Image (tube, rainbow, N blue to C red):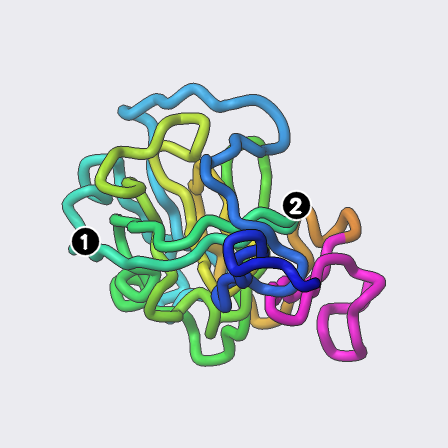
């Protein structure tokens, strides 16, 4: 005799990538300590292969005066939890690209955070419409444990590609591996094809080690 309708498990949400489970809370996960925020010395820098060959920077108040966007997207962690329908507010990555244009040869960016943490992205992923340098989550300012004052959100990739406590964006003419990519994580991090670990990489997925 089959299960009754009440006893059957609910269907999985089609927005969940393979191997992911729905998370009701927001776990705090990061490597290393939580940094102390110093508003007078904080700045966001853009450097590397800029179109002007010059560094660009915004102080804390200047950054918060930039045009803001609100996007709704899902959040997928490589540790296998997903949070659906998050509302993120902040500065669109596209705005940074407009204000500090990259040189024509740029293909990738390295996003730098406190304590030297880094994550590499293709320029296309950084320029995506839903990629945001977030200051708020679901209408509330980020807590320091979740990345205050700024964290990068790249919804189409696993969440390690979106560092907390972002401090700089480096424009690059060739790809380089970031912090976790150098430690065995996949260079591309597409959750829909479960690109979790570097041993899964195909030729062309990343720079030579």
Q: Give coordinates of residue 122: x percent, y percent.
A: 54, 69
Instruction: Name the residue nearer the viewer: 180 or 16.
Output: 16
Q: Quadrant of residue 147?
A: top left
Q: Residues within 10 Å of mark 1 (few under 14, many from 20)?
A: some
Q: Is residue 75 above or below residue 25?
A: below
In the picture of the structure, the residue carrying the numbered disc 2 is: 79
Q: Residue at x 34, y 60 (%)?
A: 93
Q: Which residues are magenta?
A: 185-209
Q: Which disc is residue 5 wearing?
A: none
Q: Residue at x 58, y 33 (%)?
A: 30
Instruction: Name the residue nearer the viewer: 101 or 142.
Output: 142
Q: Residues within 10 Å of mark 2 (few under 14, many from 20)?
A: some
Q: Which disc is residue 68 wearing?
A: 1
Question: If the image is split into quadrants, where does the C terminus sit?
Answer: bottom right
Q: Give coordinates of residue 94: x percent, y percent.
A: 31, 66
Q: Residue at x 16, y 55 (%)?
A: 67
**Which SS type dominates the magenta stretch?**
loop
Q: Give coordinates of residue 53: x percent, y percent.
A: 41, 64
Task: Give the mark nearer the N terminus: 2 vs 1.
Answer: 1
Instruction: Name the residue nearer the viewer: 88 or 127.
Output: 88
For numbered disc 1, what is the local secondary structure? loop
Mark 1 and mark 2 in contact (Cβ < 8 Å)? no
For numbered disc 2, what is the local secondary structure? loop
* Left or right: where 201 falls relative to 81: right
> Distance of mark 2 from mark 1, alpha carbons?
30 Å
Please check the rendered image and state whether residue 194 is part of the magenta-colored stretch, yes or no.
yes
Question: If the image is split into quadrants, where does the N terminus sit?
Answer: bottom right
Q: Residue at x 57, y 52 (%)?
A: 7
* Left or right: where 64 falls relative to 22: left
């Amino acid at each position: 005799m089959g299960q009754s309708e009440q006893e059957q498990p609910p269907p999985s949400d089609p927005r969940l990538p393979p191997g992911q489970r729905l998370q009701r809370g927001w776990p705090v996960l990061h490597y290393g300590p939580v940094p102390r925020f110093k508003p007078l010395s904080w700045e966001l820098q853009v450097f590397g292969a800029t179109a002007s060959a010059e560094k660009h920077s915004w102080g804390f108040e200047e950054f918060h005066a930039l045009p803001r966007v609100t996007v709704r997207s899902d959040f997928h962690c490589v540790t296998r939890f997903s949070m659906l329908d998050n509302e993120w507010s902040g500065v669109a990555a596209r705005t940074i690209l407009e204000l500090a244009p990259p040189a024509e040869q740029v293909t990738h960016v390295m996003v730098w955070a406190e304590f030297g943490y880094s994550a590499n992205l293709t320029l296309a992923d950084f320029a995506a419409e839903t990629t945001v340098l977030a200051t708020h989550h679901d209408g509330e300012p980020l807590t320091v444990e979740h990345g205050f004052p700024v964290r990068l959100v790249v919804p189409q990739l696993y969440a390690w590609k979106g560092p907390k406590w972002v401090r700089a964006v480096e424009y690059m003419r060739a790809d380089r591996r970031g912090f976790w990519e150098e430690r065995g994580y996949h260079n591309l991090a597409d959750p829909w094809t479960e690109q979790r670990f570097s041993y899964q990489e195909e030729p062309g997925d990343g720079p030579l080690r």
